[in-house]
Image (cartoon, coloured by chain):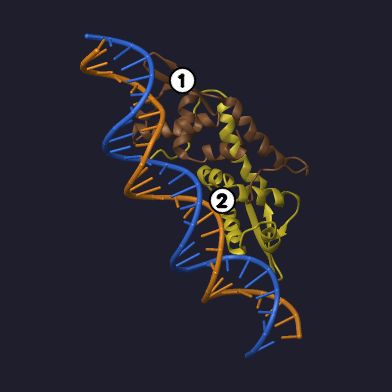
Chain colours: A brown, B yellow, C blue, D orange
Amino acid sequence: MSLNETLKAISDPVRRQILESLKNQSQSAGEIAAQFDLSQATVSYHLKLLTQVGLITSRKEKNWIYYDLNISVFEEILAWIYNFSKGPESSNSEGGK
Amino acid sequence: MSLNETLKAISDPVRRQILESLKNQSQSAGEIAAQFDLSQATVSYHLKLLTQVGLITSRKEKNWIYYDLNISVFEEILAWIYNFSKGPESSNSEGGK
DNA sequence: AAACTATTTAGAATTATTTCTAAATAGATA
DNA sequence: TATCTATTTAGAAATAATTCTAAATAGTTT
């Protein structure tokens, strides 16, 4: 997915908390939702967004849908940031209407 | 400034383009604004936001206000991301209403 | 001082994101 | 099959972010 989408995804505190929660173990949608003072539907919306952007993956098991962190996507963000500490060969983050 | 604010700041494509433009040279508000198809006021709003978050600094010189990139703030973002590739000693991104 | 230049501030309009409730799916169990 | 459980989808309401125009600042130049 695009860097733009990825950065937007991690710019929300609820979504970051979801990622951090998944850092230690795989969890079902319900288990994740239980950690928030938000409706299940709202958490489901955030999970969908994180999935679209590739930051998490999901797998169905019995009655539950388990979510897992997908660390590899962070590399894209790192690459963008490294561009600033490195030389002047400029990068290019789409956008700028 | 907070990680939350910083991530929100870089989640906007216009602001990322400003950062990238400042990567190579210091520029005045007008020079920066000229690169966008947006009003000067709008660009000024983005510059203010980036300044608040510490990603850029400004200095007045004659009739102009020059902006400079402040790379050090990126470290905070890097630290957050590194937490995922590293062990399980969990971090903590405020938020989660 | 008056006029000019560069930029910001205010406030409103527009657009996007988040959240909620209610209903829909889809699979599991009785 | 009927019912139950976990989760998602739809659509509306609430909140937040972006953008604009017009006016305000502040410092320069004549």
- Find residue D29 and report its image quarter: bottom right
Left or right: residue B65 versus residue C23 is right
- Find residue A89 and report its image quarter: top right
Q: Which residue is mark 1?
A: A26
Q: Is residue B91 visible?
A: no
Q: Residue B86 at x, y = what percent?
A: 58, 25
Q: With respect to residue A96, does A87 lie above or below?
A: above
In front: label 2 or label 1: 1
Give A70 or A59, whichever is nearer the viewer.
Answer: A59
Q: Is residue B38 visible?
A: yes
Q: Residue at x 40, y 25 (%)?
A: A29
Q: Residue A32 at x, y = what percent?
A: 40, 27
Q: Residue B72 at x, y = what percent?
A: 65, 45
Q: Residue at x 58, y 47 (%)?
A: B12
Total number of numbered discs in the rendering: 2
| SS assignment at label 1 | loop
Left or right: residue A6 versus residue A34 is right
Q: Which residue is mark 2?
A: B53
- Which chain hosts label 1? A
Q: Residue A28 at x, y = what percent?
A: 40, 22
Q: With respect to residue A44, does B3 lie above or below?
A: below
| SS assignment at label 2 | loop
Q: With respect to residue B46, does A64 lie above or below?
A: above
